[in-house]
Image (cartoon, helix red, strand yellow):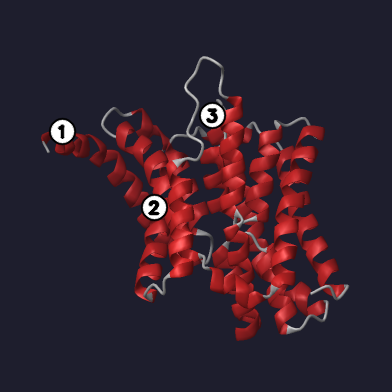
Amino acid sequence: MTQFFERASTLAPGVAVSLVLALAATFLSEHYAAPVMLFALLLGLGFNFLVDIGKTRPGIEFSARALLRIGIALLGLRIGASQIAALGWQPVLMVVLLVAALIVGSIVLARAMGFNPLFGFLSGGATAICGASAAMAIAASLPAHERKDQAMLFTVIVVSVLSTVAMIAYPLVADLAGLTDRQAGIFLGATIHDVAQVVGAGYAISPEAGDTAVIVKLVRVAMLLPVIMVAGQITRHDATAGSERPPLLPWFVVAFAILVIVNSLLALPSAVTAGAGELSRWCLVISLAAIGMKTRPGDLVKVGIKPVVLMLVQTVLLAGITMAVIKLGWL
């Protein structure tokens, strides 16, 4: 027990700082209608000097790693088999194929542009699945390297900005294309990156469009499990012969899968799933603020315009293919 309190007192200053930044990010998000993840990241970058202070560093490191994994695991309670079954098999098949194709295409495109293929895997997964949350989950499962946090933070920034633009523009695109409310919901749910922006765009059209968009989006979120399992296998494969190989599946991936199964088999009270979702959100926001504090802003500036072009191409391809599938009457 004494050891526990000593550990808690060591972590407390850094965790408290990360929590304060998360609270500030939430306040700004609620008042200025922008992604909370983006605000958390920017605030963290602004206070990056705190990671160099001995008292706050352990708690910041803890928030950036442990709370991130807890938040990812809790995402499992947002997904249930009944939600996917209610949508029908055609949209589900479309989402599965789109996610797989976009990630593979992103790896090829990243290599062609001179990037590490793992950046294509990371950015493609973030674009195809659920934006900032997916970027954090995939990055946590990929092999460690010196620019890993930088790549993840850059992906979070770009995908958050693109998701906000899509929330505003895509309902107009759906209207100009003459989509029905159900078709518009499928389009929005399959193309907008972050869940919050999907909700905002979908219900701005109609309740039917909003409900459909959220269900399609949750199918995309469900694809996070196989994708991070693949990322974990890449990490195991890349482990050097003399080093200890990571587990077959990281503990947070196992927890994520178990919670998906529990939510599919049991009729959990809405208060439980809502509470878990809120706790997950707070863990992710706190961890992203901590990751921001671990990053030097100058490192992000050095990245240049090419990664932005890559992620813009990913976003346009996702929207273009989805619209083509809908207009061809395949859904």
* Foreground of the two, 185 or 38: 185
* Residue at image mark 2: 283
SS at badge 2? helix
Say which residue label 1 marks. 3
Is residue 186 shown above or below 133?
Answer: below
> Do the residues under discs 1 and 3 have CB atoms within 8 angstroms?
no
Amino acid found under the numbered disc labelled 2: Cys
Density class for disc 1 (Cα within 10 Å; few <14, some 14-19, many ≥20) is few
Give amino acid for label 1: Gln
User: Where does label 3 land, which residue?
Assistant: 144
Residue 305 is at least partly visible in this image: no
Amino acid identity at mark 3: Ala
Residue at 63 percent of width and 84 percent of height: 208
Q: Tell me if mark 3 has few (under 14), some (14-19) or many (20+) residues whose alpha carbon lies within 10 angstroms of its own.
A: few
Q: Nearer the viewer, residue 190 or 48?
A: 190
Q: Is mark 1 on a helix, strand or loop?
A: helix
